[in-house]
Image (cartoon, rainbow, N blue to C red):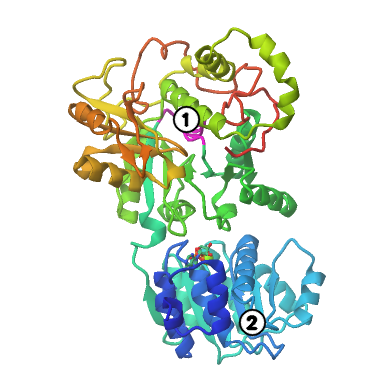
Amino acid sequence: MTKFEALGLDKPLLDAISDLGFESPSEVQEKSIPILLEQETDLVALAQTGTGKTAAFGFPMIQKIQQDSRTTQGLILSPTRELCLQITNELKLYSKYVKGLNVVAIYGGASITEQARQIKRGAQIVVATPGRMKDMIGRNMVDISKIDYCVLDEADEMLNMGFYEDIKDILSNTPKEKFTWLFSATMPKEVATIAKKFMHKPIEITVGSKNAGASTVQHEYYVVGGRDRYAALKRLADANPGIFSVVFCRTKRDTQRVAEKLIEDGYNAGALHGDLSQNQRDLVMNSFRKKQVQMLVATDVAARGIDVDDVTHVINYQLPDEIETYTHRSGRTGRAGKSGISMVIITRSELRKIKAIEKKIQQEFISKKIPDGIEICEIQLYHLANKIKETKVNKEIDSYLPAINDVLEGIDREELIKKIFSVEFTQFYNYYSKTKDLNSQDSGKGDKKGSSKGDIPTDGSVRYFINVGERDGYDWMSLKDFLRDTLNLEKEDIYNVDTKDSFSFFNTDAQLTEFILQTFTDFKVDGRFVNVEVSKNPGGGGGKGGKKRRGRKGGGGGRRGGNKSYKGGKKGGYGKKGGKKKQGFY
Ligand code: ADP
Ligand code: MG
């Protein structure tokens, strides 16, 4: 018996679950599903984003609905159109083996008559945003007077968005003898009020804060001058070539501005906020899902609907006003058991906010330094090397090969490699070699005692390059574990672990350097050489001075005059205005 079977689910659902590849129920599913299947009761379930709440109410609802009746029996209210569509899609997947079950989504910004038509054909489950639902009730386009189950999904957010009156109105159109299941990430007063007012002795379930969503997220902050926010954002992106991120701004204006600048600078970015038309928002979201957009710049309200599982980084371009909002933001990453990083770009005067958030999320932030130009160049170089290695050879090249060979005659392999890399790299290098250190002085806990460049230092901190990364199945947590176990060190001995797609970096104190290099001499895992080298950059971006890095004031700011994007488009971040946007995600 599988764990899902043990919860009391029937075969059609179990088959769909197996198709979806869900191996075992999440905590909120394990707790809610048996209750909802066995009892007719109201329920309040508190669990963070990304913990699988949709299935927690979706499975039982699907199983309990009579699919041979065409009456609308289940209503799910959710705050945004995006969420509404996501829930509908999920429910359709869950019920693919339940014949005759129709799930219909109703939401604003799309044809109301078409939605009414779908309802008329018979929708046992309706998933709706409160606004459109009210509209359709008013126009007699939907009948919810016979529902058995009503779900209030993301109740805290619906109330945040001011839907209280709408919800009240909608519920007054439902029968008294129905069951209400409320799902929420948090339990502010307003949610408690709703529960008290509209529910009868609800069973309460709380999923501990140690859920998959929260504990897999590493929280980091970067202290910069207020005017350097944008430059810092670019560096964070450049230092993470595989980034797939949501960048949060506080206002629609900033959101639009930052997105525009990123696009101008050659990144695959897009904006998502309330001033865009529904159509524009759909386009952006589609590109984001397909990973054509790697940096989605969004307001909190607009991003509330985003349910994309592989977001690697959440970047807080500015901190939100409400601490609560930070939890929602960071919950966009580290979903479905994956790890993620939530970065905060912050000025010195805002530092105290970090303390408040730490208390709220019960997790400590790591103070990090914005990587300097040299570290970014190094990362990009390795990344480029890997990209070349992975590139499939284009057959069309063959016919030009003799001519190319003629041109390159007499250049040996090493020389050729150097030249190829210089073609790709010099612009990038030139940009970064002239930029300043963006970090505000004394930016906090500072775990790096910036050691000098060049020779291996004997005190301070040393940064290492290691030739394994995300592609080998590591994230910062598992790589740290691997290093700790291999080296037989304590957890604190290894820090600043940054995994990239095919390589990674980490730091130790300098006394350990010899030991580490020795351990990783001729070291193999699964028959493959794992190689560790001292990184050119000592402090993971913390170093100061150094002849390559000094130089013009202000450098990091806006666009560069460069006339060509670093290969792959977005990475260079200094492409000309209007430079071509590469759709590649590499
Ligand atoms: P929430 O509503 O709590 O934010 P979702 O219901 O949107 O979370 O689920 C987040 C993601 O996790 C979805 O992509 C969903 O398909 C996936 N998921 C849900 N339950 C499981 C499970 N038991 N095993 C693996 N993945 C799951
Ligand atoms: Mg949800």
Residue type at tag 2: Val
Question: Is residue 193 something that shows in the picture?
Answer: yes
Q: Is residue 433 above or below residue 470?
A: above
Question: Is residue 196 something that shows in the picture?
Answer: no
- Res. 112 image quadrant: bottom right
Residue 227 counted in the magenta span: yes
Residue 169 counted in the magenta span: no
The answer to whether the residues at label 1 and label 2 have Cβ atoms under 8 Å apart is no
Q: Is residue 514 left or right of residue 421?
A: left
The picture places residue 584, in percent across and down from the top left corner, at 64, 38
Report the magenta stretch's main SS: helix
Crowding at dot 1, Cα within 10 Å, few <14 / some 14-19 / many 20+, comes out as many
Crowding at dot 2, Cα within 10 Å, few <14 / some 14-19 / many 20+, comes out as some
What residue span does the magenta drawing correspond to?
224-241
- Res. 331 image quadrant: bottom left
What residue is drawn where x is 59% and y is 88%?
Answer: 148
The picture places residue 231, in percent across and down from the top left corner, at 50, 27
- Res. 167 image quadrant: bottom right
Q: Is residue 57 above or below residue 431?
A: below
Q: Is residue 39 left or right of residue 278?
A: left
Residue sitting nearer the eye, 497 or 445: 497
Gap in angstroms between the C-alphas marked 1 and 2? 51 Å
The picture places residue 147, in percent across and down from the top left corner, at 62, 87
Q: N-terminal of the two: label 1 or label 2?
A: 2
As helix, strand or loop, the secondary structure at mark 1 comes to helix
Residue type at tag 1: Ala
Residue at which label 2 appears: 98
Residue sitting nearer the eye, 6 or 173: 6
Residue sitting nearer the eye, 106 or 489: 489
Residue at which label 1 appears: 232
